Amino acid sequence: MFGFIKRALKKTVKNLEEGVQKKKKEASKEEIEELLIEADVDYDLIEKILASLPSKINRVMLKNELLFLFHTPRIKTPEVKPFVELIIGVNGAGKTTTIAKLAHLYQQQGKSVIVGAGDTFRAAAIEQLTRWADRLNIPIVATKQGHDPSAVAYDTIAKAKAKNFDNAIIDTAGRLHTQSNLAEELKKIVRVCNKAMEGAPHRKLLVLDGTQGSSTINQAKVFDEMVGVDGIIVTKLDGTAKGGALLSISNELKLPILYVGTGEGVEDLAVFDPNEYVDAILDAIFE
């Protein structure tokens, strides 16, 4: 996986390099401030980062400050079978493709996977996930548009238990007619998952569109209030110069970023490594 995150940040890094012009051993607070703004780091967070630093900043100083923002507790993954994950997020963030990438990642680890097409609000979502399941040669539990998504979640978990699958990944709708509608539906799915298997879903993962930068933070807060988010997956990181937003997202939400989407292929999902991420940004600034 090493190098995937750096490649995914290529637009952000290129943007920073253009702003720097010539890499340096030390940079002033004003220079660092401008560069972080350019990378879409929230301004209040930039002030917080720079507050304890001297007027001339070197690589090690800035690295320590940036890494500190990712000091969020890692999730302890329970040793259960099937391990059930609920994938949430707005339409267009890349949920369905992310589910395929996650399933592929588990397959590479030698695990058996089943998916549930719980976004019954959109026929296209069911069709897209079915195509991915066929391509990856994994079973899918799907129904028609408009059917009860909770029933899909229940059936997916029941089948995963009966067939002894390692992982079950369940899609959800991203947008219903009102926010309260969406909240009630998601809460119901969580309750039904727990009926199908006590403790499920074991992880609720929020998919955020990296091209939207820091503006996804409010979106994330809403989903967290609805059902409680356990971890974040940032998609489309390769298509944006706003890669600095991951600092704001992690700091503001106090949630671990678990994976990042690094391209459009099924293998383009990398386990997020804060060290590699911070180094990629600093490589653009310092010698």
Image (spheres, helix red, strand yellow):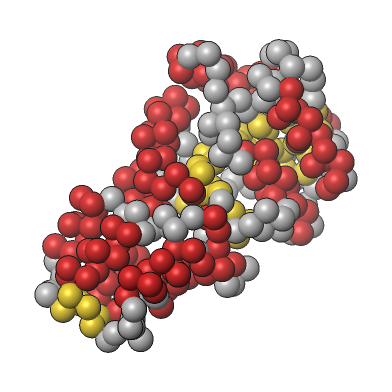
Q: Quadrant of residue 280 in the image?
A: bottom left
Identify the image quadrant of the N terminus: bottom right
Q: How many marks?
A: 0
Q: In screen coordinates, is 48 left or right of 236?
A: left
What residue lies at 56% left-to-right and 51% top-to-bottom? Answer: 236
Q: Is residue 154 above or below residue 96?
A: above
What residue lies at 24% left-to-right and 63% top-to-bottom? Answer: 34
Give whichever of 16, 179 is nearer the camera: 16
Give whichever of 191, 237 is nearer the camera: 237
Image x and y of residue 263, in percent = 64, 57
Q: In screen coordinates, is 269 left or right of 76?
A: right
Image x and y of residue 38, in percent = 32, 59
What residue lies at 68% left-to-right and 22% top-to-bottom? Answer: 122
Q: Is residue 93 visible?
A: yes
Q: Is residue 48 above or below residue 16?
A: above
Q: Is residue 231 above or below residue 171?
A: below
Image x and y of residue 95, in percent = 62, 38
Q: In screen coordinates, is 167 left or right of 281?
A: right
Q: Is residue 96 above or below residue 3?
A: above
What residue lies at 42% left-to-right and 33% top-to-bottom? Answer: 219
